[in-house]
Image (cartoon, rainbow, N blue to C red):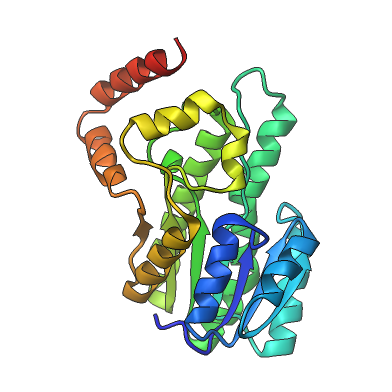
Amino acid sequence: MELADKVTVITGAGSGIGRSLAHAFANEDAKVVICVDLNGANAEETASALNVTSRGVGLDVSDEKAIEALVAEVEAEHGGIDVFVSNAGYGLRGGLEIPTDEWQRMMAVHVWSHLAAARAVLPGMIERGGGYILNTASAAGLLTQIDSGPYAVSKHGAVAFAEWLLINHGDEGIGVSVLCPQAVATNILGGFTAEDKEGRQAAGDGILDPDDVAQDCIDAMREERFLVLPHPEVTTYFERKATDYDRWLRGMRRFKARLFG
């Protein structure tokens, strides 16, 4: 898919990967870029720096009605949405001790927001003959996140939902890609421990710049490639997991012991 002259909505656009994606779409001559973020001021700051028609919107992506209203408003104003980037997310350390409502909140942001966006934009996209959805998950959605149970589980859900979308709507002209990076220099890293961040680097994969990750997304969408893997090592890890699941699990237990004792 070529991105020039496309109406695009990006959630989580107030910082990090979302902000870099907004600039990347603008550089591809998008017709309109709608920048959405829980922090409306940050969304407006991103939008104001773009060289295309744009605006910032404050919105909680866990609010399905708010997403529906946003989509209806953008469609009414611009005649339809060509690309929806469901990117908002956050980090949270912990496991069984985390209250259930915190697990549910992370599921709402990392999975149900993708569902709400797809429900809202797909009818119009299909009626107009096509469109594209880019969902941000994580390498944790293919592998795991040792230091965060809800992050690992919700990101697995995000990958599974993106798969389902493409299988069921790909023949209706809908392109789907899912972004699965490891560590990126964004605010999400603040939700994990210093030891975990060091562990990601100790694995030899490094922490990437969000601008580079955004460009990987653009390239993947142009090629209509499902998995966006800015850390190429993730392919190897994913293959090892699929080839010998028990061995991979034993290796992750050893890795956890090395990181956290």
Name the one closer to the observer, 234 or 75.
234
Which percent across, then down, holds residue 241?
A: 27, 33
| As drawn, 257 above or below 124 | above
Q: Can residue 68 be seen in this view?
A: no
The N terminus sits in image quarter: bottom left
Q: Considering depth in this image, is 190 or 75 the residue closer to the camera?
A: 190
Comparing 234 with 149, the one in front is 234
Q: How many marks?
A: 0
Q: Position of residue 224 (x, y in %)?
A: 35, 71
Query: Would residue 204 be visible to someone looking at this image?
Result: yes
81 sits left or right of 253 in the view: right
Residue at the limit of the structure toward the left, as seen here? 243
Q: Residue at position x 70%, y 27% from top?
A: 100
Across and down, in percent, residue 154 comes to: 55, 40
Q: Is residue 160 above or below residue 135?
A: above
- Name above or below for residue 102 compared with residue 253: below
Q: Quadrant of residue 247?
A: top left
Which residue is located at x 33 percent, y 32 percent?
203
Measuring from the top left, give residue 181's x and y in whole percent.
42, 48
Residue drawn at (45%, 49%), measured in percent from left and top? 159
Residue with the most extreme top position: 261
Q: In which quarter of the image is the C terminus?
A: top left
Left or right: 199 with respect to 44?
A: left
